Image (tube, helix red, strand yellow):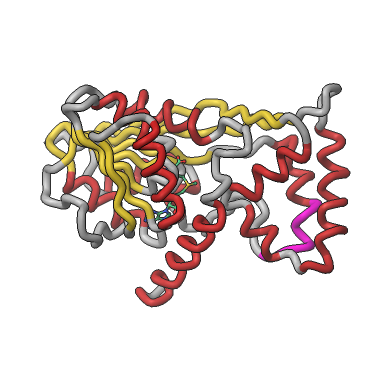
Amino acid sequence: MSDVVHDSVKSSLAQLFDRSAPTYEKVGVDHFADLGRRLVDHAGIAAGERVLDVGCGTGAVLVPAARATGPRGEVIGVDLSAGMAARAEEEIVRHGLPQARVVVGDAETLAADGIPADPGSYDAVLAGICLFFYPRPEEAMARYRRLLKPDGRFALSWWGRPDPRWDAVFTASAPFGRGPSSHALPGDSPFRSVEALHAALLTAGFDDVDTVEEDCVTRFDSDEQWWQWVWSTAGRQFWESVPEELRPDAVAAVNAELARLKAADGSLSSTSKVRFTLARRVS
Ligand SMILES: C[S@@+](CC[C@H](N)C(=O)[O-])C[C@H]1O[C@@H](n2cnc3c(N)ncnc32)[C@H](O)[C@@H]1O
């Protein structure tokens, strides 16, 4: 893919997340905040450290990272989407974390003003559920390694297997829209397997690469809340592609599958796998 195509992919992504931003993590479902706290724990962020949070979104990783560094540390978040970045800024103020700040820009190239990018500038680079959106994740990995101090950590979270009980929901919606209705990756993505990601990180020059896989349990009070949640995430992209006149049938097909998944109290839950990968720059 050429640079022009990559720029257009990123511009569409920024617009997609701008549309999600008003409701992202605001529909009463604790999803990304939980994953963000876990990523910060896996990375072992300590008081006084300097941290770069790439693809910071509304601050799910940035806020716990800034709590962990404390006022003597510094956390810089970067996001393509001005809407997501504005929400992260609100969170910084709401939680009283002057050690954190946000830059709107491309975290893959780090070309934006306001992002310290000297070699050896950071103790840790964190990437919560975002690196698989990059057109050239391998280049970004090598770039992040250069930014780390010796013994610095690059920690990222990414998806493992989706909950197989939900396959029927995505199968029911697929004929109505364009593109994947669940997480899908190009065949050569380093995120196709743990082995492929480890190989990419080792090629980027990291040492001590390790991944742990954990459950990501997401609970919805009702199918209405699940719909609100889908529209608050990047998952809305599929539903935006469903032509207006087909939406009633598409929604009905999905609701029929949701009815099969509902517990007696009308709630729904999904247990996907989430992976936390830690890579160290030894020297
Ligand atoms: C699923 S959200 C995750 C946000 C946050 N890290 C969290 O854990 O909630 C993915 C974020 O990555 C951002 N993103 C994707 N590609 C990016 C890039 N090249 N540069 C900066 N941000 C990017 C999106 O704008 C979006 O806010």
Q: Is 133 or 236 nearer to us in this picture?
A: 236
Task: Report whether 25 appears left or right of 279.
Answer: right
Q: Is 121 or 160 nearer to us in this picture?
A: 121
User: What segment is highlighted magenta in the picture?
Assistant: 172-178
Please check the rendered image and state whether residue 264 is part of the magenta-colored stretch, yes or no: no
Task: Report whether 201 appears left or right of 114.
Answer: right
Task: Report whether 103 appears left or right of 223.
Answer: left
What is the x, y in percent for residue 178?
A: 68, 65
| Quadrant in the picture for the C terminus | top left
Residue at 57%, 39% in the rendered image: 26
Query: Dividing the picture into quarters, in which one does residue 267 lie?
Result: top right
Residue at 31%, 47% in the rendered image: 102
In this rendering, does residue 280 appear at all? Answer: no
What is the x, y in percent for residue 251?
A: 82, 53
Q: Is 274 or 193 nearer to us in this picture?
A: 274
Query: Dividing the picture into quarters, in which one does residue 50 lie?
Result: top left
| Quadrant in the picture for the N terminus | bottom left
How many discs appear? 0
Q: What type of secondary structure mainly makes up the magenta span?
A: helix
Residue at 25%, 60% in the rendered image: 112
> In the picture shown, does residue 265 fall above or below 279?
above
What is the x, y in percent for residue 35?
A: 48, 31
> In the picture shown, does residue 252 fall above or below 270?
below
In this rendering, does residue 51 appear at all? Answer: yes
What is the x, y in percent for residue 83?
A: 45, 54
Residue at 65%, 42% in the rendered image: 229
> In the picture shown, does residue 172 fall above or below 96?
below
Query: Dividing the picture into quarters, in which one does residue 281 lie?
Result: top left
